Amino acid sequence: MDQVKIGRFIAECRKNQNLTQMQLAEKLNITDRAVSKWENGRTMPDSSIMLALCDILCINVNELLSGERISMENDNRKNEQLLLDMAKEVERKNKTIWTSMWLIMIVSISALFAGVLISAFLIPEGVWQVVAILGICVLFLIPCFYALKLEVSVGAYKCKNCGHEIVPTYSEALWAMHMGTTRYLKCPECNKRTWCKKVLTKK
């Protein structure tokens, strides 16, 4: 999706309705700064107000996301293209989140080993050394919990038994046995517990 093109289209439609940015913002219960950001192509309207925005501007969602008026004969083609674009955008965001999760884990594990080694060699044996090592381990767990949250937020886990794609809650994933990103989960489809592999693209 071309945000700049969409922004220009929003501005054009707003002017066609004889509305200022402030008036449009008031109708949507948002700030005129948000409208300005849309029209400058810096941000997109939130999905929760897209329908209301389209009603005010007398356009449909397809036209909004295309950034242009669409004739009836081109509507189906535009629908397919928009769905493809949205799927690609979701896939791109999922990959970004997935990469972030692995970076957090790699940095955390590296910091854990470095911290334990420093504590073992630089702090004299005794209570303070044990406290330092335990403190480092606790600090290591914080980014791990966040990394798990990122892992659960994208894709799904594929049941090895029936192929059903499972989207567990955070607590279900947290307490499930795991090897890397493969987790031992109960499938709601076949009602069996299996080792479910993480897949980024849900059906």
Image (spheres, rainbow, N blue to C red):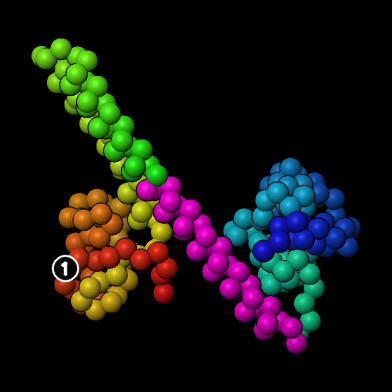
Where residue 196 appears, x then y in whole percent?
24, 66
Residue 139 position by quadrant? top left
Residue 185 position by quadrant? bottom left
**Quarter holding the C terminus?**
bottom left
Residue 25 visible to an observer of this rendering: no
Would you say residue 83 sits in the magenta stretch? yes
Q: Residue at x 22, y 15 (%)?
A: 122
Q: Judge left or right: residue 128 versus residue 151.
A: left
Residue sitting at the far left? 126
Would you say residue 28 sits in the magenta stretch? no
Where residue 190 appears, x then y in whole percent?
20, 77
Residue sitting at the far front? 121
Q: Is residue 188 above or below residue 130?
A: below
The range drawn in magenta is 73-102
Residue 39 visible to an observer of this rendering: yes
Q: Is residue 89 above or below residue 129?
A: below
Q: Residue at x 22, y 27 (%)?
A: 116
Near mark 1 (Cα within 10 A), the count class, few <14, some 14-19 or many ≥20, is some
Q: Is residue 168 above or below residue 122?
A: below
Q: Residue at x 66, y 55 (%)?
A: 44
The residue wearing badge 1 is 193
Q: Which one is nearer the viewer's eye here, 185 or 115?
A: 115
Tell me the kind of residue under disc 1: Arg
Q: Main secondary structure of the magenta part?
A: helix
Label 1: state its secondary structure: strand
Q: Residue at x 30, y 52 (%)?
A: 170
Q: Judge left or right: residue 102 versus residue 137.
A: right
Residue 158 position by quadrant? bottom left
